[in-house]
Amino acid sequence: MTAAVSPSAVSAAPVPPLAGFTIGVTAARRAEELATMLERRGAVVQQGAALRIVPVADDTELADATRALIARPPDVTVATTGIGFRGWVEAADGWGIAEDLLAALGSGKLLARGPKARGAIRASGLVDAWSPPSESSAEVLDHLLEMGVEGLRIAVQLHGEPLPDVVDALEMAGAEVVEVPVYRWLPPVDLGPLDRLIDTVLCGGIDVLAFTSAPAAASVLARADERGVRARLVEALRGPVLALCVGAVTAAPLESVDVPTAQPQRSRLGAMVRQLEAELPARVRRLPVAGSVLELRGHAVLVDGELRTVPPAGMALLRALARRPGRVVSRAELLQALPGGSGDEHAVETAMARLRSSLGRPKLVQTVVKRGYRLALDPAAGPSSAGGHCVHGAVR
């Protein structure tokens, strides 16, 4: 006979690493893939594509660049991405000029920025001459400059993101550069989702804003500028909101306005998610309160390891209390902490009631009669660790 297991002996299911955090996704391409990875780790995701992709087959600019290269084949072709190179060849096939394109590219030297680009080159029947171990455009540029490019015609396959530093350096060294704009990105037709995402950032509802391309970062800043909220958005990204970028090129538009960014070592979606798993624990506040451990996450709270969803108003009050744990915070101060910061003290009482209900343990927050509220910091934590002094007054 199998012995019965008591409820206390059963371990609670582990809380997903990103549970309690809300992450904004600005990507157009692979947005669903990124959102799925984040949601599997417990995050709440809000999407607001900052760009739309011009279909390759309909892109007259790409068609013109392709025909120009067939007419005058390049000495060197740089493939920056596998999907971009494949899309280029497939588009040429649709136009009936794929064989001519491959012949033109094969007459010169092909460089691949990374293994995926190298695989796409080989899959097309061509042979790559060199690829950097770092998958870095900067290393590709160094290689070209070392071999000498004066008088050479160089095709650079782009994939949404311009490479002005690479192009300018090659042209200054005497090369003729033909930019091949595979998958050009333009502002979205429907700006509603992007505007809602920006608004959520401004009202404190987003913990992390994720960017997978430099044009997306630039587009978000440009849209905020059009709406007259750019200064507020930049302030949010410099403070409570973490700007997560897939790599240094993507981060450039943000860092140009002094927004700090987090970046993985490898420019991959999976690496972005792992970077978040490393970054967000530093933003968690843990407090011993009324015999429990209270862990403040982005927009939720763990109470003794149990995830409790808290309404925005309640979370605002809890953060105000947590800034001075164990000390009284007046109703007037808490009113200012509420979203909007207006109304009367009855709004504080209503939000506080909902907060206590959400936490499931009313005693975590004490009412100090005629004075305000405080987190019931455990005596063992000591007044010094609370950053304040002992509180006197009747509590209930």
Image (cartoon, rainbow, N blue to C red):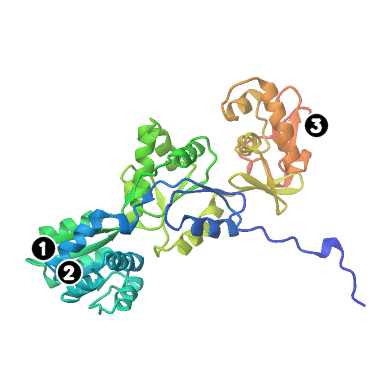
Quadrant where the N terminus is found in the figure: bottom right
Residue that sits furthest to the top in the current view: 344
**Which of the 4 image quarters holds residue 130?**
bottom left
Q: Is residue 153 left or right of residue 50?
A: left
Label 3 vs label 2, nearer the camera: 2
- Look at label 1 and name its amino acid: Ala
Q: Which residue is mark 2?
A: 144
Circle number at residue 396: 3
Estimate the spatial distance between the alpha carbons at disc 3 and disc 2, rounded to whole Å. 73 Å
Answer with the quarter of the image where residue 364 lies.
top right
Element on which disc 1 rests:
loop
| Figure check: 24 above or below 76 | above
Position of 177 with respect to 370 (left or right) is: left
Mark closer to the chain start, 3 or 2:
2
Label 3 residue SS: loop
Check contact, mark 2 vs mark 1: CB within 8 A.
Answer: yes
Numbered label attached to residue 175:
1
Amino acid at dot 3: Arg
Earlier-in-chain disc, 3 versus 1 = 1
Residue at (35%, 33%) from the top-left corner?
226
Along the viewing direction, whichever of 114 and 326 lies nearer the viewer? 114
